[in-house]
């Protein structure tokens, strides 16, 4: 089972969602994923993920317009089971 780190960035002003996400991602270990509730798709954060070989997905959110999921590639199978259709 994966452990979730959650960040509600839906009401945060820029650049705080990016800054706080980077802080959480710096500590993200295999077996953990970040779920970020956001009002927009954070494309600069996806660039960061690509540079660090992290997987990501944006999908319709539960509590905000989008849920952004970020995880280690080795956890893709477990993410797929948790979130149908991912990645």
Image (cartoon, helix red, strand yellow):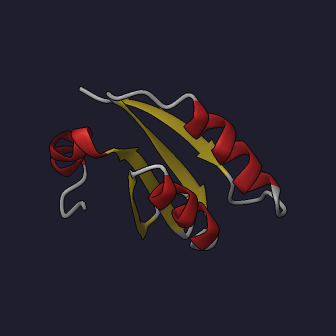
Viewport quadrant of the N terminus: top left
Quarter residue 11 falls in: bottom right
**Residue located at (56% from left, 28% from top):** 27
**Residue located at (50% from left, 57% from top):** 51
**Residue located at (58% from left, 72% from top):** 43
* Residue 14 x %, y %: 82, 63
* Residue 72 x %, y %: 35, 41
Q: Is residue 72 left or right of residue 17?
A: left
Q: Is residue 80 left or right of residue 40?
A: left
| Res 31 visible | yes
Instruction: Looking at the picture, tell me which residue is in the foreground, 25 or 6.
Output: 25
* Residue 6 x %, y %: 55, 39
Taking 69 as reference, is 78 above or below it? above
Taking 64 as reference, is 16 above or below it? above
Residue lying furthest front: 51
Viewport quadrant of the C terminus: bottom left
Quarter residue 10 falls in: bottom right
Instruction: Looking at the picture, tell me which residue is in the foreground, 8 or 18.
Output: 18
Total labels: the figure holds 0
**Residue located at (42% from left, 53% from top):** 69
* Residue 13 x %, y %: 84, 62
Q: Is residue 8 left or right of residue 6?
A: right
| Res 62 visible | no
């Amino acid at each position: 089972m994966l452990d979730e780190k959650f960040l509600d960035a839906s009401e945060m002003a820029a650049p705080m969602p990016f800054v706080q996400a980077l802080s959480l991602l710096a500590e993200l270990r295999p077996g953990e994923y970040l779920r970020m509730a956001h009002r927009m798709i954070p494309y600069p954060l996806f660039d960061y993920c690509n540079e660090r070989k992290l997987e990501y997905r944006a999908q319709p959110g539960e509590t905000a317009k989008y849920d952004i999921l970020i995880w280690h590639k080795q956890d893709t199978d477990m993410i797929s089971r948790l979130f149908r259709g991912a990645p």
